Image: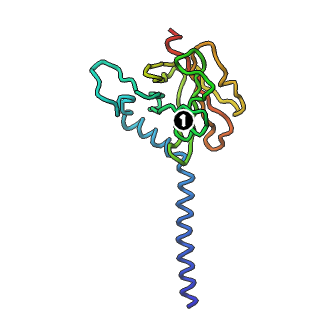
């Protein structure tokens, strides 16, 4: 009887050890999974055509404009809807335009924010924001029109530096997210100027 009890206890301990090991591996490796997927997409095949997927047929040589406000960063293969809300709860849906900031139809600072990483869906829409480089193009489709921007600055600031959301006299697009991945105490900021204003 004692041997059976010991055998059951040993089996239970072994099963529990496996569960703890698998859970530990999941928690440790999950934040790196988007990085691995990004590398595989970049090295094995090109990204699918952005914006044009899942949209109705269009005449040849005519550009497709999404019907919803959409942020596209071709350099990192990103295409995400931009959510409008007065509440930060919109961050749980993906990219959120800060309500007190401008929008592309006006001159000023349009500020878009998103999570870097979460275990919930959508998993950190701005996970790869650190791969955006100066000179990269960012496109914002807004209210049926296309607005193109060129990245001018990428930098990191403490989380209390609210001046990154300050109004500007010219059309600017500011994107930010938490950084670094494991200890998100700062903000990774991308600032881009209107391509039309630069011409």
Q: Nearer the viewer, residue 121 or 29?
A: 121
Residue behind mark 1? 126
Q: Residue furthest front?
A: 86
* Residue in view at x 50 percent, y 14 percent: 195
Q: Position of residue 106 (x, y in %)?
A: 55, 16
SS under mark 1: loop
Front residue of this view, candidates 41 and 62: 62
State left or right for residue 174 relative to residue 57: right
Residue at 52 percent across and 60 percent down: it is 22
Residue shown at 69% from the left, 34% from the top: 159
Question: How many C-alpha atoms fall within 10 Å of the one at disc 1: few (<14), some, or many (≥20)?
Answer: many
- Seen in the picture, residue 47 relative to 169 is either above or below; the reply is below
Taking the spot 61% from the left edge, 36% from the top edge, the residue there is 87
| Colour pattern | rainbow
Q: Position of residue 145 (x, y in %)?
A: 44, 19
Q: Residue furthest right?
A: 160
Q: From this view, report whether residue 33 is shown above or below residue 3.
A: above
Residue 35 position in % (x across, y down): 50, 41
- Total numbered badges shown on the rendered structure: 1
The residue at the far top in this view is 199
Q: Position of residue 92 (x, y in %)?
A: 55, 41
Vertical arrangement, residue 14 with respect to residue 152, above or below: below
The answer to whether residue 80 is left or right of residue 47 is right
Quarter the N terminus occupies: bottom right
């Amino acid at each position: 009887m004692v041997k059976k009890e010991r055998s059951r206890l040993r089996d239970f301990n072994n099963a529990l050890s496996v569960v703890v090991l698998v859970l530990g591996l999941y928690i440790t490796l999950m934040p790196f999974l988007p990085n691995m997927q990004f590398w595989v997409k970049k090295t094995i095949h090109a990204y699918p055509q952005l914006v044009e997927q899942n949209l109705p047929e269009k005449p040849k040589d005519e550009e497709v404009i999404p019907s919803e406000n959409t942020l596209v960063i071709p350099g990192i293969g990103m295409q995400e809807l931009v959510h409008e809300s007065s509440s930060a709860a919109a961050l749980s849906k993906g990219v959120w335009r800060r309500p007190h900031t401008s929008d592309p139809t006006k001159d000023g600072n349009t500020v878009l924010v998103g999570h870097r990483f979460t275990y919930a869906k959508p998993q950190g829409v701005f996970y790869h924001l650190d791969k955006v480089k100066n000179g990269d193009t960012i496109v914002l489709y807004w209210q049926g029109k296309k607005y193109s921007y060129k990245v001018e600055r990428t930098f990191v600031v403490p989380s209390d530096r609210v001046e990154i959301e300050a109004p500007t006299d010219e059309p600017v697009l500011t994107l930010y997210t938490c950084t670094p991945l494991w200890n998100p105490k700062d903000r990774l900021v991308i600032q881009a100027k209107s391509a039309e204003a630069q011409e």
